């Protein structure tokens, strides 16, 4: 079967290391539990990395970029050429995620899974164009089965490169004008919610634009009412190449034992599909933030996700996840480097 | 007058730089406003630092340590000697704040404003012991007027050292067994709330301990019902040397034009006193987090504070504020280093 690899088993967290990490946290010079979520983050990373000294120094940020046929319906505040222009901006170092990756000393890879125009060779950009954007899902399925398989695989291959390079934390990001429309269509269907509950302004639509976007989604989903509702089929019909790549990446990362930090709305929808396909990947997914896109809260709730912060961010590109990286790093530093009561000669409770 | 310097004028933020920073944010390659609070943080720092390129690379973390006579009432889960032991742990590098300061490459200074026992000379610890702890405010005023003045001044002197060293962000922290009792007493009085609303477990009291702590506060405050309710007098009667030092530091930092990142419950209570004394310092105060100590939310609300995250931290030492530093740094990096639409050749909305 085309996507059989998605069903391969997922790594398991180490219960032994959960126990050891908890013991260590309780021995450190602080009232037990007084570092709150910083303790929980370190314990969870220790379990996932099966180590007594968790670390997220080596971080990979992989941005998947693709265009969306549905952009023709006027569902975005920005013109479609911006997707390709932003790929060039990622390469040149001027985008938010470029700046963040540099500040964090993270590995940034940009994977072009299908911009409308071929931007030609660009430093740091991998050409994996599956097609010149998806088809407009108002009229036809966004992808063929072969295209969906290729996009899922592009995600897995990114994780394989990251894993080979010794990455300790994997962040997926996305760029694609029109992709909140795809994400909202998937969220509405998987969460069984009315589209207006999960549709938002994206890059900056006004109320009229949001209404139009909602109507586009409603019409498209009505075409699939009679069809098989499997998540993968939904992804093929109304998804995007970058969303499919993220889905593949999340499943592959859990299969390969690599912790994942999930970004905002689009990435959380990809995680929702991935968790629907493989519920056992859940422990591998950390959630960075709650975005300003109104549907995000429902997707997060459905995933039992507890994001670290809510800054009203809504840029994508993995920018929210990148912002959260230092919090995980400091959690590891505290866990690894604080003195115990015995070492410091401090009286315990 | 003894504390006349507290009334000296506070620096003002630059409206010109607010405007310039907003213009720059709107020119960067992202939908306007899509970085949410990261944009607001950068704009505010630019205004306070009166610069087009805000930065918080050089950070000072000053920990004020002192003992509390009221600890004799059994209001803490830890024995009183822990204050002095933790001062030694700060010096040796084993405490949470030591680890965080090192990870952040921040300047850590520890100011002993009054531990019960003299720990002797310790590397990185400044001996400013005002007394061997405050008096037990169950029976008498915690401090004399001279002691209060000395504690306030210890805070100002720390800020002067930081400012001379070129610090771009000042963090105050505290260590003092019994100091949530002082803080709760001050909060109850200034917020005009019943003590049980602002008393919490501190380092780990059980329900019985919390009830006892509440009763201690209630009895002490009843002694002051007939007295002058000025914040400074309240600080003298039920406060602590480290809380007074933080109050002095916050006012001095605003006077000297140094942005402040406030930590948890104790520090926010010091900020509450400082804002009561000098309302114009408000723009200089950033709030890092909401702590697990239940009274913190009321203090924050009274200060119109919007903390950056809520991780259930309750350690003190400035640890929550230190954890937030990378968020401010990344906000500055994004503001300073992203490309504009024009520079990157990306189409605007």
Image (cartoon, coloured by chain):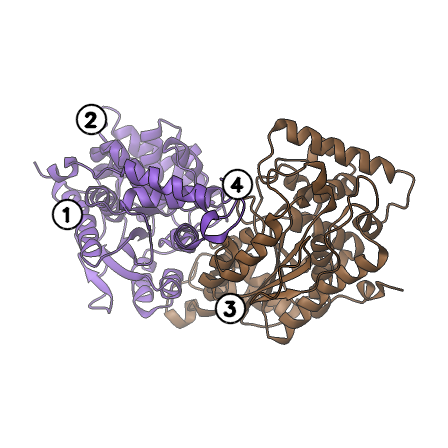
Chain colours: A brown, B purple
> Which numbered mark, 2 or 4, is in the foreground of this view?
4
Q: Secondary structure at mark 3?
A: loop
Label drawn at residue B150: 1
What residue is drawn where x is 38% and y is 67%?
A: B94
Label drawn at residue A57: 3
The first of marks 3 and 4 along the sequence is 3
Q: Along the line of sight, which residue is nearer the eye, B346 or B112?
A: B346
Q: Secondary structure at mark 1?
A: helix
The spot of residue B251 in percent (x, y) is 22, 41
Query: Is there a contact, CB below 8 Å, between mark 4 and mark 1?
Result: no
Q: Chain of mark 3?
A: A
Which quadrant of the figure has residue A218? Answer: top right
Query: Is there a contact, CB below 8 Å, between mark 3 and mark 4?
Result: no
The reply to whether label 2 and label 4 mark residues of one chain is no
Q: Secondary structure at mark 2?
A: loop
> Which numbered mark, 3 or 1, is in the foreground of this view?
3
Check the image and report above or below for B155 versus A122: above
Query: Is there a contact, CB below 8 Å, between mark 2 and mark 1?
Result: no
Residue where numbered disc 2 is placed: B228
Check the image and report above or below for A279 versus A222: below
| Left-right relation of B50 to B95 | left
What residue is drawn where x is 38% and y is 62%?
A: B104
The reply to whether label 4 and label 1 mark residues of one chain is no
| Left-right relation of B148 to A259 | left
Label drawn at residue A312: 4
Query: Is there a contact, CB below 8 Å, between mark 2 and mark 4?
Result: no
Label drawn at residue A344: none
Does the rendering let one see residue B247? yes
Q: Chain of mark 1?
A: B
> Which numbered mark, 2 or 3, is in the foreground of this view?
3
Give the alpha-carbon distance from disc 3 to disc 1, as whole Å: 44 Å
């Amino acid at each position: 079967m085309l996507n059989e690899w998605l069903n391969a088993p997922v790594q398991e967290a180490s219960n032994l290391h959960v126990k050891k990490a908890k013991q260590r946290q309780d021995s450190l010079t602080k009232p037990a539990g007084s570092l709150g979520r910083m303790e929980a983050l370190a314990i969870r990373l220790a379990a996932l990395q099966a180590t007594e000294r968790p670390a997220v120094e080596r971080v990979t940020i992989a941005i998947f970029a693709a265009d969306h046929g549905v952009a023709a319906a006027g569902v975005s505040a920005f013109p479609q050429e911006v997707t390709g222009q932003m790929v060039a901006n990622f390469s040149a170092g001027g985008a938010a995620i470029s700046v963040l990756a540099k500040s964090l000393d993270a590995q940034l890879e940009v994977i072009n899974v299908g911009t409308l125009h071929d931007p030609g060779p660009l430093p740091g950009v991998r050409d994996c164009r599956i097609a010149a954007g998806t088809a407009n899902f108002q009229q036809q399925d966004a992808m063929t089965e072969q295209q969906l398989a290729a996009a899922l695989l592009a995600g897995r291959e990114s994780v394989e490169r990251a894993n080979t390079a010794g990455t300790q934390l994997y962040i997926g990001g996305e760029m694609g004008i029109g992709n909140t429309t795809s994400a909202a269509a998937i969220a509405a269907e998987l969460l069984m919610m009315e589209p207006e509950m999960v549709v938002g302004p994206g890059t900056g639509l006004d109320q009229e634009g949001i209404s139009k976007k909602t109507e586009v989604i409603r019409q498209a989903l009505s075409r699939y009412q009679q069809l098989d509702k499997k998540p993968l089929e939904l992804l093929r019909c109304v998804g995007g190449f970058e969303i499919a790549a993220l889905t593949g990446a999340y499943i592959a990362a859990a299969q390969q034992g690599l912790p994942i930090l999930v970004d905002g709305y689009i990435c959380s929808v990809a995680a929702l599909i991935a968790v629907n396909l493989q519920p056992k990947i859940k422990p591998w997914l950390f959630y960075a933030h709650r975005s300003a896109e109104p549907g995000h809260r429902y997707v997060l709730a459905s995933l039992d996700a507890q994001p670290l912060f809510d800054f009203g961010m809504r840029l994508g590109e993995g920018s929210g996840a990148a912002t959260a990286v230092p919090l995980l790093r400091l959690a590891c530093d505290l866990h690894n480097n604080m003195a115990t009561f015995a070492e410091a000669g401090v009286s315990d409770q």
